[in-house]
Amino acid sequence: EDDNEFKGKDTIQKIIEENTSELHLFDKAAQKQGFISLVEQMITEFKRYCLEPQHLSTEIDDVILKEKVHDLQFIFHKFQEEIENNYLLHEDYLRLLTEQIQHSDYIKDATIYIDGFYDLTTLEYTLMEQLLIHAKETTVSFTLDRAFEQVVPEDMHLFRKSGEYYYELSQLCRKNQLTFKQEHLSEQKRFKN
């Protein structure tokens, strides 16, 4: 267990213990095994998808769901306050990297190759966009049977995830008026050791 994960769980536990009167449902649920880990995973997902506590809407008709969202929003907000100037989580490193790419001479002179990805979070797409904009050249490989520049593949398409990734990156290039060049490799090649 790494230090950030341990501190995250401790911080969440502390927030719940110190704020039981503010919580509608989670004050009791916090005693159940695995609950703190589950809340920590949710906070991690929020950060990966660039959600802030105020993005969690409590305008929900279902009373129990509304109370759960309220408690999550409250814990997430307190968690953000607690770690703001003390800790950096993995997602914070990606966010900081994304914010600083535009200032990097190293990136401006770099040729970047990205291979093996087919499903990115909002934070990772934002990072990818900054690399596309600021790097001298960025090459991304896809496993696809055809290009998906105008439309996303159907749900049952064999290469749906890669096709969605291709579509999103082609849209990022259009939005930022970047040159988008595709090269189709049809023959299989292997490196020789």
Image (cartoon, rainbow, N blue to C red):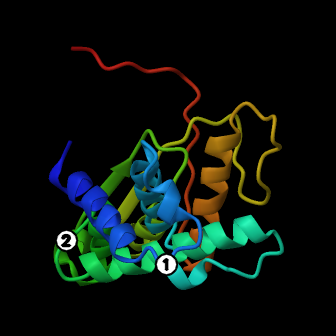
Name the foreground residue: 89 vs 132: 89
Report if residue 67 is visible in the image.
yes
Q: Residue at x 33, y 75 (%)?
A: 18
> Quick check: 39 left or right of 88?
right
The image's mark for residue 45 is none
Report if residue 100 is visible in the image.
no
Q: Measured from the top left, where is residue 131 in percent x and y?
A: 37, 68
Name the foreground residue: 168 vs 61: 61
Mark 2 against mark 1, which lies toward the viewer? 1
Residue at numbered disc 2: 87
Q: Is residue 102 above or below residue 129?
A: below
Q: Measured from the top left, where is residue 75 in percent x and y?
A: 44, 73
> Quick check: 93 left or right of 114?
left
SS assignment at label 2? loop
Residue at mark 2 to residue at mark 1: CA–CA distance: 19 Å
Q: Measured from the top left, where is residue 134 in percent x and y?
A: 35, 75
Q: Is residue 151 above or below residue 74?
A: above
Q: In this view, does 24 lie above or below 9?
A: below
Examine the image and state in which quarter residue 84 appears.
Answer: bottom left
- How would you rate the neighbour count of disc 2 (Cα within 10 Å): few for under 14, some for 14-19, many for 20 or more? few
Q: Locate the N terminus by quadrant.
A: top left
Type of amino acid at the residue the image marks with label 2? Tyr
Residue at numbered disc 1: 74
Type of amino acid at the residue the image marks with label 1? Phe
Examine the image and state in which quarter residue 183 appears.
Answer: top right
Q: Residue furthest top?
A: 193
Q: Measured from the top left, where is residue 47 in percent x and y?
A: 44, 67
